Amino acid sequence: MRKLICRDTIHKRVQEIGAQISDHYQNRPFTCLIILKGSTVFAADLIRAITSEFMDIDFIRLSSYCGTHSTGKVEMLMGELEKFRGRELLVVEDIVDTGTTLSFFLEKLNEIKPASIKICSLLEKKEINKGRVKIDFLGFDIKNEFVIGYGLDMNERFRNLPDIMVYEG
Ligand code: 5GP
């Protein structure tokens, strides 16, 4: 394992993003939609860096089935999303790699017509995503390496590490 981003650097950046988000929404109500499970640690810090008194939070689990066309599961997701109709949404993701997961989710989310959708991601592998998913509030651009820690896992392990590490086997 090799340390990529230390806890102090993460903390400083999260405070900056929180200030940007507070500035963007001002006194408008919005929902911070946290994507489970990888974003939980980031989101716990981020929401406390947002000063708005008009924010609420919600959670959604996106699993690999999002990449398939399994109708039943998509419908289940749509049912869960219906409550966000007309709402300003801030989607909080841990990492955008190819952008496949988020593109699929955003397509579904757009169908229920929220008032607005902004994306916040702690990490982006820009050389892989290549602008497919536009991130409005980004923590760090990283190289194409597999990272763990600060909520990110490798087969459900290492989410508890306080720093972001490169997993080298
Ligand atoms: P995408 O659909 O953008 O290719 O991948 C998004 C999902 O893949 C992320 O939400 C995350 O669960 C997983 N992922 C992609 N890259 C990494 C990585 O470097 N480390 C970890 N732990 N998960 C990753």
Image (cartoon, rainbow, N blue to C red):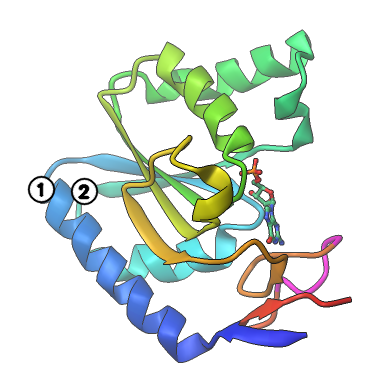
- Image mark for residue 55: none
Q: Which quadrant of the figure has residue 148?
A: bottom right
The image shows residue 136, relative to residue 13, as above or below, that is above
Residue 24 forms part of the magenta stretch: no
Q: How many marks?
A: 2
Hey, what amino acid is under mark 1? Asn
Q: Residue 100 location in percent, x, y? A: 62, 34
The residue singled out by tag 1 in the image is 27
* Classed neighbour count for the residue bearing mark 1: other residues with Cα under 10 Å, few (<14), some (14–19), many (≥20): few
Q: Which quadrant is the C terminus positioned in? A: bottom right
Q: Which quadrant of the figure has residue 16?
A: bottom left
**Chief secondary structure of the magenta portion:** loop
The image shows residue 88, relative to residue 95, as above or below, that is above
Q: Which residues are magenta?
A: 155-159
The residue singled out by tag 2 in the image is 54
Q: What residue do we see at 34% from left, 82% from top?
A: 12
Q: Which of the two residues, 50 or 101, is positioned nearer the viewer here?
A: 101
Question: Is tag 2's residue or tag 1's residue first in the polypeptide sequence?
Answer: 1
- Tell me how far mark 2 sits from mark 1, CA to CA: 6 Å
Mark 2 touching mark 1, by CB under 8 A? yes
Q: Which quadrant of the figure has residue 1?
A: bottom right
The image shows residue 59, relative to residue 14, as above or below, that is above
| In this rendering, position of residue 124 left or right of residue 57 | right
Q: Report whether residue 26 is seen.
A: yes
| In this rendering, position of residue 6 left or right of residue 20 | right
Q: Residue 111 location in percent, x, y? A: 44, 12
Q: What residue do we see at 78% from left, 75% from top?
A: 167
Hey, what amino acid is under mark 2? Phe
Q: Report whether residue 94 is seen.
A: no
